[in-house]
Amino acid sequence: MKHIFLLVLLFISIELSFAQDTTNGIVWHPPILLSNDTQNAFQPTIALTGEDTIHVTWFYGRENIRLPYRRSITGGKDFEPMKELLPDSNSFPFQGFRPSILSLHDTVRIFFTV
């Protein structure tokens, strides 16, 4: 007989999002909302450059924002406003699907399908 164990975590209280120390010394801080809403942001990808610059992009399931991007130069303490990397709808009439970020030294490349 096969047994399948499924662990489901439901966060009912907002108080669970406060920083918590774990037994191995990692401190988890509250989640940071990077998208404009929580309904249509999928498949986030993250890349780091240097010691404190974080680059983030994701698939945004709305037609008016076709390839979102945010950056933090403070190690994630705060993020710059969201930018759209495909603002020219004549050259790129479709959204950027499945975005991925690759960084090497100070170069950041974002790959996506249209």
Image (cartoon, grey):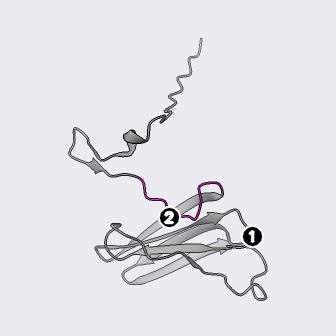
**Residue under numbered circle 1:** 63
Above or below, 70 relative to 37: below
| Residue toward you, 62 or 98 | 62
- Residue ID at (44%, 75%): 71
- CA separation in Å, label 1 and label 2: 18 Å
Query: Which residue sits at x=52%, y=79%?
Result: 109
Mark 1 neighbour density, 10 Å: few (under 14) some (14–19) many (20 or more): few
Inspect the image, locate mark 1, and give the three-letter code of the amino acid beneath it: Glu
Residue at image position (33%, 52%) is 29
Q: Earlier in the sequence, mark 1 or mark 2?
A: 2
Question: On the rendered structure, is 93 left or right of 80?
Answer: right
Q: Position of residue 105 (x, y in %)?
A: 36, 81
Task: Place residue 64 in its image quadrant.
Answer: bottom right
| Magenta region, residue range | 31-39
* Residue 13 horizontal/vertical position (percent): 44, 36
Which residue ends up furthest to the top in the rendered image?
Answer: 1
Q: Which SS type dominates the magenta stretch?
A: loop
Q: Report whether 28 appears left or right of 32.
A: left
In the image shown, does 73 or 49 lie closer to the viewer?
73
What is the quadrant of residue 23 in the picture?
top left
Q: Is residue 103 above or below residue 38?
A: below
Q: Which residue is mark 2?
A: 34
Q: Position of residue 98 (x, y in %)?
A: 64, 64
- Circle 1/circle 2 CB separation < 8 Å: no
Left or right, residue 26 beside residue 78: left
Q: Is residue 36 magenta?
A: yes
